[in-house]
Amino acid sequence: MAMRDLIAALGLVLVIEGLSLAAFPAAWRRAMKAVLKSPEAPMRIAGLAAGIVGVLLVWLVRS
């Protein structure tokens, strides 16, 4: 069951990202340019924070 959940979650991520990219390509381009100019440390912190929030959400839904 866990593998099916993982595949479903990845599918939802692809749907959301794909739809937002199709609807707002210029915004994605601006965001990617901004990311390329950003220092690494804040990006790492944001990535860790997003990962922690994701784990907490999954934990809350599963418990």
Image: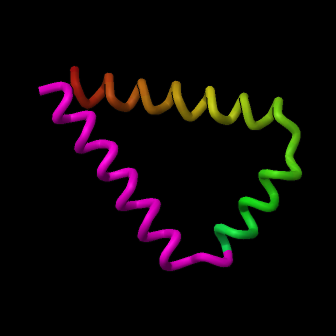
Residue 2 versus residue 6 in the image, above or below? above
Question: In the rendering, at what x and y percent does residue 62 appear?
Answer: 22, 25
- Residue sitting nearer the eye, 11 or 61: 11
| Residue 47 colored in magenta in the image | no
Q: Quadrant of the C terminus?
A: top left
Q: How is the image coloured?
A: rainbow
Residue 20 versus residue 43 in the image, above or below? below
- The residue located at (33%, 44%) in the rendering is 10
- The residue located at (75%, 68%) in the rendering is 30
Quadrant position of residue 25:
bottom right
- The residue located at (73%, 59%) in the rendering is 32
Q: Main secondary structure of the magenta part?
A: helix
Question: In the rendering, at what x and y percent does residue 58 appear?
Answer: 33, 29
- Residue sitting nearer the eye, 42 or 33: 33
- The residue located at (62%, 26%) in the rendering is 48
Residue at the limit of the structure toward the left, as seen here: 1
Quadrant position of residue 8:
top left
Question: In the rendering, at what x and y percent does residue 42 appear?
Answer: 80, 35
Report the number of discs.
0
Q: Quadrant of the N terminus?
A: top left
Residue 56 versus residue 26 in the image, above or below? above
Q: Range of the magenta residues?
A: 1-26
- Residue sitting nearer the eye, 11 or 62: 11
Question: In the rendering, at what x and y percent does residue 43 appear?
Answer: 75, 37
